Amino acid sequence: MTYPNILVFVDFPTDDVDAANDFYSKVFNWEIEERIPGIFHRIVPGQNFKLDDGSQGPTGNLHMGISKAANTRPHPNPEPPEPTTLSPGGRSTRAWILVSEDDSFDRILDTAESLGATVLWRNHFWTEFGGANASFIDPWGNQINLWQHLEGVEVDEETHQVIGEALIPDGWTIE
């Protein structure tokens, strides 16, 4: 293989595509296209990845989808393939969202919670990749992890380990 396989899309399963559309557009301010109304909506989460100088780079954002669990598309048969239900109480999709510098964990978590999400944790720092994180479960059982680099924390580009001492805000957990 001369070029690696590339992740191009992730779907969030739901039993109510319209409600999930409303949820994600409010929580993350994402543009969402109703490609197949009530069955599949495409999330367009923003602009291209930023370069070090803050300008937009050549790499586009990753698109995501909201798909109706009872009939996820595409598939070749008129009847949907199994399983056709969500996985309550178990692991489901787990996505990591890089939070914009002009947004905040608190705004996102508070909005998500007001729309039926369950906050799993806030204000945690992971030394493995040198980043702040928080997490919630959306109303359909998908886990959404929020990620942001803390100002003043230096990370080794090769090992992704924190260099020196990370000054973590009071009250935060760290691992």
Image (cartoon, rainbow, N blue to C red):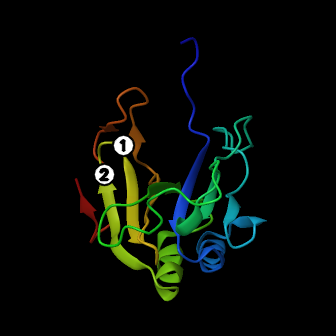
Q: Do residues under tags 1 and 2 come within 8 Å of each other at their CB atoms?
A: yes
Q: Which of 130 and 81 is in front in this view?
A: 81
Q: How crowded is mark 2: few (under 14 residues within 10 Å), some or many (20 or more)?
A: some
Q: How far apart are marks 1 and 2 (CA)?
A: 6 Å
Tell me the amino acid under the disc marked 1: Phe
- At x 37% / y 76%, what residue is drawn? 119
Left or right of 109? Residue 77 is right
For mark 1, what is the residue?
129
Q: Residue at x 58, y 17 (%)?
A: 3
Q: Where is residue 117 in the image (x, y as percent from the top left)?
A: 44, 80
Q: Position of residue 151 (x, y in %)?
A: 47, 53
Furthest residue in direction bottom, as rendered? 114
Amino acid type of disc 2? Trp
Q: What element carries label 2?
A: strand
Vertical placement of 149 versus 171: above or below? above
Residue found at x 74% / y 43%: 55
Q: How many marks?
A: 2
Residue positioned most to the top: 2
Q: Is residue 88 above or below residue 12?
A: below
Q: What element carries label 1?
A: loop
Q: Position of residue 172 (x, y in %)?
A: 28, 67
Q: Name the residue that disc number 2 marks.
A: 126
**Side (left or right) of 114 relative to 90:** right
Residue 168 appears in view: no
Residue 123 appears in the rendering: yes
Q: Position of residue 74 (x, y in %)?
A: 65, 51
Instruction: Please name whichever residue, 25 or 121, is drawn nearer the observer in this view of the structure.
Output: 25
Residue 12 in the figure: left or right of residue 17: left
Q: Which mark is residue 51?
A: none
Query: Which sits in the foreground, 23 or 114?
Result: 23
Crowding at dot 1, Cα within 10 Å, few <14 / some 14-19 / many 20+, comes out as some
Question: Residue 35, located in which quarter of the rendered image?
Answer: bottom right
